[in-house]
Image (cartoon, grey):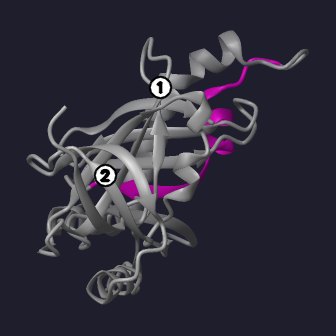
Amino acid sequence: MTEPHVITGVVGPRGATCSKWGADVDWTMRFELRAWKDAVGLLHAELLSVSRKIPDDEEELPSRIKAFSLVAVRVTRPVDGVAELIDLLRTDVVDEELAAVSLELQKPIVHQDVKLGTLVLDRELDWFDTKAQWGARMISLTIGAVDDQPPKVALEAALALFDESSAWERRVRGYAADELLALKNESWLDEDEHPVSRDQFLDRLKLESIGVDEDGGFEFGFDDGDLFWDHEILVSGDLNSGPTSASISG
């Protein structure tokens, strides 16, 4: 292990998260420091990603690392924006510069669009969200964020979808029926339920959300009308290729 470094920093909006992959026995905890100071007090504005394996007897550790808090940690030497956690030393650090960064991170970031409305950044999920008028109804719209801003390509994709909302909804609904109707009738019929026709399938779909990622790809989310026992139907694609995949979720 490289020589330990004691640093202080501002925890990012997601706090500490845990994941487990494949045959791993232990969970891996990760969190970001959005700004941090080294042992001599030099402020680093670049993001530092910190991780560590969490055995069962330390399962409470992630809950101590809260979003926007100021912490002191002992880590391996940061290299290319990455370090491994050795110890969590303090969760009540007092530092004016880091506190100012924390306050700035918690200020709402808003993007106004004439057609899409007021988009507000959800820092934890790293996207902008709003309620937007789609045809005759309101739906949830999310747009992926890059550097706390909605990318031009994502905004342009969202506007293109909304400008041709009727055509896109027909196309996406039709694709969902093409991909999932057989699955419904082969594996998801209730007892004594008759097979569902294509028209019946389409009638039961209710569009609830559209997500556009930072590269302009889209995902339509439908209430399934109990076709798949209240699972969400998701249809993904992009403007050039149209819908390319359909699945049930939840």
At horizontal 34% and vertical 63% (from top left) the residue drawn is: 143
Which residue corresponds to the image point at 71% horizontal and 24% vertical from the top-left?
196
Q: Nearer the viewer, mark 2 or mark 1?
A: 2
Residue corresponding to mark 1: 178
**Residue at the extreme right of the image, as rendered:** 192
Foreground residue among 141 and 122: 122
Q: Is residue 167 visible?
A: no
Horizontal and vertical percent for residue 126?
36, 62
- x and y percentages locating residue 133 in the rendered image: 49, 75
Question: Mark 2: which secondary structure?
Answer: strand
Residue at the disc numbered 2: 74
Can residue 238 be seen in the rendering of this structure? yes
- What's the residue at 54%, 24% (across, down)? 180
Q: Is residue 82 above or below residue 138?
A: above
Question: Type of residue at label 2?
Answer: Arg
Residue 107 quadrant? bottom left
Badge 2 vs badge 1, beta-carbon distance below 8 Å? no
On whether residue 210 falls in the magenta region, the answer is: yes
Q: Is residue 215 left or right of residue 31?
A: left
Question: Crowdedness of circle 1 by 10 Å Cα count: few (<14), some, many (20+)?
Answer: few
Q: Nearer the viewer, residue 101 or 60?
A: 60
Position of residue 82 relative to residue 162, above or below, is above
Residues packed near mark 2 inside 10 Å, few (<14), some (14 to 19) or many (20 plus): some
Mark closest to the chain's N terminus, 2 or 1: 2
Magenta region, residue range: 194-213
Residue 86 spot, x, y in % from top left: 34, 43
Q: Position of residue 190 (x, y in %)?
A: 84, 20
Which quadrant holds the C terminus? top right
Residue 123 found in image quarter: bottom left
Q: Amino acid at mark 1?
A: Asp
As drawn, the label of residue 100 is none
